[in-house]
Image (spheres, helix red, strand yellow):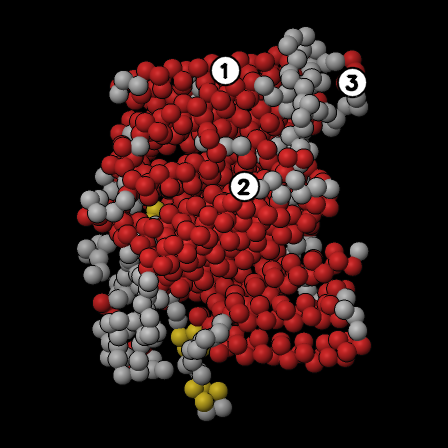
Amino acid sequence: METLFSLLIGVFFASAVYLMLSKHTVRILLGIAILGNGVNLLLFTAGRLTREIPPIIPFDSDVLPSAAANPLPQALILTAIVISFSFFAFLLVLTYRGYQELGTDNTDEMRLAEPKDESLPPLGY
Amino acid sequence: MNTLILRTVAPPITALMLVFSVFVLLRGHNEPGGGFIGGLIAASALAIYGIAYGVSAVRHAIRFHPMAIAGFGLLVGALSGVVSIFAGVPFMTGLWIYPSIFGVEVPLATVISFDIGVYFVVLGSVGSIALALEERETD
Amino acid sequence: MAAPTTAPIDLSAAMVMAPTALADWLVIAPMGLMITLGAVLMMVRHKLHLHGWIAIPGLVALVILDGLLLWRVAVDGPFTMTAGRWLPPFGISFTADLLGALLAFTSGIVALAAGIYGLRDINATGRRYGFFPFLMLLMAGVTGAFLTGDIFNLYVWFEVLLISSFGLLILGSERQQVDGALKYAVLNLIGTTLFLIAVGYVYAIFGTLNMADIARKVPEQRDVAPLLTLSTLFILAFAMKAAAFPVNFWLPASYHTPRVVVSALFGGLLTKVGVYAMIRVMVMLFPLEREELSLLLAIAAALTMVLGALGALAQSDLRRMAGFAVIAGIGNVVAGVAIGGQTGISGAILYALHSIVAMTALYLLAGEAARIGGSWSLQTLGGLYRQAPGLAVSAFVIFFATAGLPPFSGLWPKIIILKAALDIGAWWLSAALLVSALILTLTLGRVFLLAFWRPQLASAVGEPVSPATWHRSGPLVGLVAVLVFFGMFPDLPVRLSQGAAATLLDPTAYIQSVFPTGGAE
């Protein structure tokens, strides 16, 4: 099961990297979203995959059943999901603003902050 | 989007979702649910109302700026963590009181107030993003 | 639901039973204060006149709290508070040691300076966009990253400071800022995601996220787990945050776009958080892996400092010049980490402390120069010496300190790192250090010559600007005073950073503070 998940994570990462290598901001954004999901899967697999028994302490017991699933990765993933969700929302707004203000989604043409024909400092006075 | 059907059903749906969000928030204390998902439901309620009646109607209806709501939630959350300084236990330790209201013992905890803080943070921040996106669509 | 007092369970197996001393709250207090004030400021966002009255006393309180924390750590050694009473490693620990406390204290000073400068520099629009709330949350993120003892929590603080830095970066939403912010946001987000991937592997290998616990368990796993690969991933992620050479291009693309006080904060603090994380993880958690990767780190460091200095030489915009100077400074710190050992690490820590103050001062100086001279460009600036002699004196000090010339605070860390490099026989690294310092001296000397010494250009004579109020001159004078004082009397910071390096190289005291009784399990 872990092997299968590792391969799946590899596919996620590969497609994320492929998309992020694009020049267009929307594709980069999609790549980041896929990367975030790949990381969540990675965290999930890092906690070892166990099925069937949810990590809930039964009424007549003080400790978890021994074969219960690991609850910690789920807490980590929840945190990571919340963070990546809010960042994705922010980046979405920023990309949209970027498209409105700069008139392009091609990162090669976004040279407003770093103009091409910037003058060198004077050599003397 | 601005159809008669949507305009008719939007107020009851919004009200229902807001009530449901509070239910989910309180249910999260012992069962699946909680502040985050409750806040998301409440924020989507605002978004639906905004689609039907316009963003300014929502802003008028919630009275406070969404970011102020998020700030309030953050304050509640932070204070719930800090209260434990008075009990001589570390930061974020859950503290319980068991007042009896009308003969029913109600367990109240800083855990719940923290969750309420999360609810407002999510409602405020997601709500403000949603409203900002809707606002842009109209102009 | 029964009250805990009637529960039959033995709580001492999972919980800290000893009452918490009030002094232990010092490790939480800076973040608690900043988050609370940030929340309050968010609620009163539209009452602009209140912002300064809440924020500045808050930042003063932050400096005092950080100072008390530093004092306690320097006297008693590291101490820990674990959230929620859970025994570590189950609860999230906050551990203050000398490294974290030193950096937190220095950042507090810098934030206070920036906050005061921001009172005048940030106009009503910027305040309405939330300069002060974001400043508070940024400081919560920065201080939290320095003081946490849990590696996943470190990731969370990284994100806290990242989201507040986004807010600060696009204050006012100008076109240039949107362009800069897009590159900054995307590349930093990828960097922190790489860090999160590494954290996932740490959890897979060690089954714990508490840094003290990881430090204990690394020797057991060294032969079975791919720790070298993991360390490389950490180095890449932190180098991206710190803007070290092959992954530094986001910094000069974005740091000159926001308001200058925001640039000053970013230049002083954000890259140093990446450097801090690199020191913490590579020196304390994976010391043998750091040794194996030291050549890689050294090459990256040498390239970072030389290319950073060359980049600064080629810029005519003062803020872009300062951005490349930040990168050159990062090269020095990474060089110290690459060399390792007591001398190298203490040099790196001292340089990071110096760089926090010097880079903030450099940006604030650029802001003042542009305000008086009416331009950011060396093409048109001139005659500042005649118009503002006091500013010229500050510029002289800050330039000397940035280039590492005596008698200011940049000299000592540079000497320590240089000595460490010569001790291990890395002549090329020492050469890179000196070449970088030489190029920076040339760059900054030219700025002084052109912007300050050269007579004002006839075309640039405009209306006289109002003289600087204390809001603007006070922070600059304060930071310059720090640079001068620790240049003249380097004894205290040098001793403290040596102590910090010693705690990192032998983390027994750190582990002891988290697990006083040997810990759970």
**In the rendered image of this protein, does residue C182 appear above or below residue C93?**
above
Pointer 3 chain = C
Q: Mark 1 = which residue?
A: C439
Q: Pick the residue in front: B7 or C150.
A: B7
CA distance for labels 3 and 1? 31 Å
Q: Quadrant of the C terminus of chain C?
A: bottom left
Which corner quadrant of the image does residue B85 belong to?
bottom left
Q: Quadrant of the N terminus of chain C?
A: bottom left
Q: Residue at coordinates 48% horizontally, 59% vertically from top-left?
A: A81
Q: Residue at coordinates 56% horizontally, 76% vertically from top-left?
A: B22
Pointer 2 chain = A
CA distance for labels 1 and 2? 34 Å
**Quick check: C299 left or right of C312?**
left
Q: Pick the residue in front: C433 or C82.
A: C433
Q: Mark 3 = which residue?
A: C461
Q: Mark 2 = which residue?
A: A21
Task: Estimate the x, y position of residue A44 in percent, counting from the top left.
Answer: 38, 60
| Secondary structure state at the residue bearing disc 3 | loop
